[in-house]
Image (tube, helix red, strand yellow):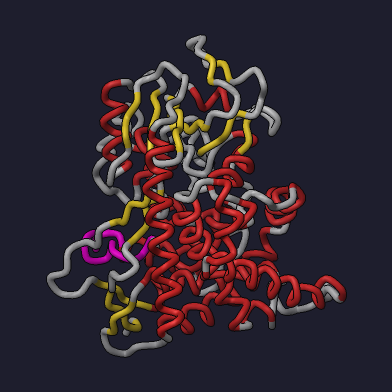
Amino acid sequence: MYDQWTGDHALATALLGLATLTFVILRTRKSALNLPRFEVTSDVVKTIEEAHAHYPEDPFILSMVGMELVILPRSGIDVLKALPEDHVSIKKHHHDVFLGQYTYMGTKAPEFDEAMRYDLTRNTPTVLASFVAEVAYAVQQSFGQPREWTSFQPRSCMSRIASLMSGRAFVGLPLSRDETWSQATVTYTQDVTRAWLVLRMIPWPLRVLIADLLPQVRSLKSQRRMTEEKLKPLLKNPPSQDSKVPGGDMLRWFRQRYPEHIEPLRAELQEVLHGESINKENIQRLKKLDSFIPNMPRIVTHPRGLKLPSGQVIPHGTRVMVRAHTLNMDPLLWSNPAEFDGFRFAKLREQPGNAFKYQHATTGTDNINFGHGIWACPGRHFASSQMKVVLAHLLQHYDIKLPEGAPKPKQQHFGLAIVPDETATVLMKLRE
């Protein structure tokens, strides 16, 4: 135990020294772009809002340790939406930023995106059937069936639910419920983030020497070996298509703060479903549920860079992003954007000509939460359907509230990432 502690202590001391050195090195590197620059401190949202207030129609630079991004105005959406991979690449961005040679981020084959974009979308009824078949088991595994108010940490519980339901759709039973498999899908994202936070502070010539010493990197390699071994039997003997077994944090805090949404959502579920399971046809009629759920970085790869409508040229190798947050909060697009209105988009869809607009997975120049154009997230319909099935099940079977006197949990900021507080709790019990 002592040897392990001293080894970890020595590694931590070395990393601290490297982090200090790297900070100085990186901070001395400045972009050649002649654009306004804003330093990201502890709250990236406030930084973007401040920058947008000064330059609403112009690009600016967000600067942080180890990375700079050019943040484009809304006009940048039309510039980016149809550009091919050899001009701008999110895969290269992920590989570079998350150090894909160690974390595997940005290394997936193009066939994966094609399968997500076409095969899953084409087989929506099958995917929905797998979600519906798994949701009761997944929720019970995470929350149980408490008859009295019981405390839960929703972030970890929802991660397990997503793991079980996605696994049911992707690999099916029994592998999707294999504890080792399920746990690996939950911890992978955590390990990627933790490994990246440490590795990005280490000068690149030393990373190759230190990377394998990090427990998170060792865990990622172990998970990859494990998943390869468990997938081999499935790849060798895929399940029959004739099988009759389906499959191959939005609700956390709103009940106490926005109770007026609960009963209308439940009433819609009752009116549309009539006690039946969700399927491809009736999920489209759950307009209030679709509205409630919602309330894109790239790297320039073309040698000549990226030309903006203003005539400015963003050079090759620059990271660019469109400011989705200010788009979501633009009073010219949305009435009272800072006010929570769970049925905002349901009301908009009731207007003539809007029946198929403003859906959760719909993209456009007024909604880039899932990207847009050829860069729209290929798995957005998969994710949206999964959220609706889980939310519908929780609404129908559970009551949820914050602990007495507890404030709304704060978000945690890690550079550009904003995540819910993993220590926050809610109280849940079965509906009577």
Q: Residue 283's image quarter? A: bottom right
The answer to whether residue 258 is magenta is yes
Which residue: 65% across, 17% down? 304
Q: Quick check: can you spot residue 218?
A: yes
Q: Residue at x 32, y 90 (%)?
A: 147
Task: Classify 85 as above or below 129.
Answer: above
Regarding residue 277, the answer to whether it shows in the image is: no
Give the side of residue 107 with respect to residue 185, left or right.
Answer: right
Quarter-of-image position of residue 47: top left
Q: In the picture shown, does residue 395 fall above or below 367?
A: below
Q: Residue furthest top?
A: 311
| Residue 335, image x, y percentages | 28, 35
Magenta residues, start to end: 250-261
Residue 315 rendering spot, x and y as whole percentages = 56, 21
Q: How many marks?
A: 0
Viewer-side residue, 312 vs 204: 204
Residue at the extreme bottom? 147
Classify residue 432 by image quadrant: bottom left
Location of residue 197 in the rendering, given as x and y in whole percent from the top left corner: 44, 55
Residue 26 in percent (x, y) is at 43, 37
Residue visible at 31% across and 76% down? 399
Residue 219 lies in the magenta-colored region: no
For the point 52% across and 27% down, the residue is 77
**In the depicted structure, whether residue 345 falls above or below residue 284:** above
- Furthest residue in direction left, as rendered: 405
In which quadrant will I find the N terminus? bottom left
- The residue positioned farthest toward the right in the image shown: 236
State left or right for residue 192 relative to residue 45.
right
Q: Tell me: 156 left or right of 386.
A: left
Give whichever of 253, 112 is nearer the camera: 112
Position of residue 72 relative to residue 108, above or below, is: above
